[in-house]
Image: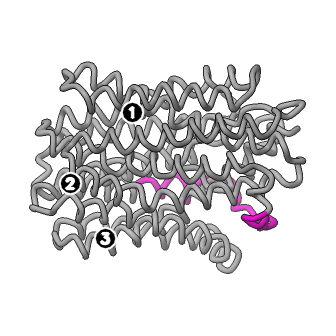
Amino acid sequence: MLTVLSTSWPLLLGIMLLMVGNGIQGSLLGIRGSIEGFTTFEISIVMSAYFAGFLFGSRMAPAMIRKVGHVRVFAALGSVISAVLVVYPVAPDWIVWSLLRVLIGFCFSGIYITTESWLNNAATNETRGQALSAYMIVQMVGIIASQALLNVAEPSGFVLFVIPSVLVSLAFLPLLLAPTPAPTFESTAALSFRALFRISPLGCAGMLLTGGVFSAMFGMASVWGAMKGLSVRDISVFIGAIYLGGLVLQYPIGWLSDRMDRRKLITALCGICAVAMLVPVAFDLPFSLLLVAAVLLGGITNPVYALLIAYTNDFLGKDDMAAASAGMIFLNGFGAIFGPVVTGWVMGLVGPSGFFLFIAVLYIALAGYALWRMSRRSAPAGTGHFANLVPTASPVAASAVLDTKAR
């Protein structure tokens, strides 16, 4: 690991600063939107717009990189992100914010693909697994740290928008000045969605549903907090607990998944999370217990995402894994577009508890479908290794992780 850190620290430092900047703006907009008087539905459209842009960027960025190179794409997209972040408070209109979120989602998608391919190229076969594990950890640490920065100024002012803009700008310095040469970008062979569904119906359905869970969790947690009347400090702690759970529980669940039928584990985790989400719907919990629910939400959502990819790959040969993962990540992104919108609609009907209710319904649906699939198909004879992936990973990271696990 020390070797990885000594050679890849500029890339890891850059991505951590990017995640801090992205994490702040994701939470801040939900709080600031409430201050500006946006309705819950209007804020949900703003949050969904990011995932629409992210999905579009994941399809367009590889072609851009092949055409003009990593450095130019990285610099151009980074400049746009830095500019957009300071435009939000200048134009407090939900339609303008939605358009800006599409743009910033597109740019972050391209930034992730550029950085991940760069990191993958810098690692050797012996260090790639450690490098990508460090990358995933740095992502989570960056998001957790971003929530603390929400407390340094009032969300009604300009300072909290300037901070992520500065951090994103600073993130480019270690990346663009790193001695690691920019890699060539190789495209991934395509796999049709029909073929992918035939290979793993559970994987495809699960990716759509967890996309809705992740986007609701990522985009609407701050909106829930504002509706609930929580302080900025409590909102930041709640969101930080979500990502802390994802960081802590990823590896224990991954270890367990390599030793049992993944579908049983997926079903059990979904059932646990559904119950954990229904409790705050039924009862007015103290904040300490809400934090427990947040840890379980994040601690289960990230591993379930990776479990679905691992389960699908159990039916694939090494050469097909990257294409299948790219298709599943696309399905996850497509489901993510609708998560905040539906969550906002449900919250408008039943109040703040609609945040937990929507997530519970999705996990109940996934658990039920997994149980049904177990009655239709036996478990694969052998399983591959669990790949430590988070929903923010691009197809580049997924391909690199899976290639390492297949060796």
Residue tagged 3: 98
Measured along the vertical axis of the image, is residue 207 above or below residue 359? below
How packed is label 3: few (under 14 Cα within 10 Å), some, or many (20 or more)? many
Q: Secondary structure at mark 2?
A: helix
The percent coordinates of residue 309 (x first, y second) are: 69, 44
Q: CA distance from mark 1 to mark 2?
A: 23 Å
Q: Nearer the viewer, residue 2 or 217?
A: 217
Left or right of 20 in this view: 374: right
Residue in the picture at 47% in, 57% down: 336
Q: CA distance from mark 3 to mark 2?
A: 19 Å
The percent coordinates of residue 209 (x first, y second) are: 53, 49
The percent coordinates of residue 193 (x first, y second) are: 72, 64
Residue tagged 2: 348
Display colour scheme:
one colour
Q: Secondary structure at mark 3?
A: helix
The percent coordinates of residue 256 (x first, y second) are: 68, 20
Amino acid at the residue labelled 3: Ser
In the rendering, which numbered label is found on residue 218?
A: none
Q: Which region shows up in magenta? A: 170-194
* Visible residue check, residue 84: yes
Q: Main secondary structure of the magenta part?
A: loop
Residue in the picture at 82% in, 39% down: 314
Would you say residue 32 sits in the magenta stretch?
no
Left or right of 195 in this view: 7: left
Amino acid at the residue labelled 1: Ile
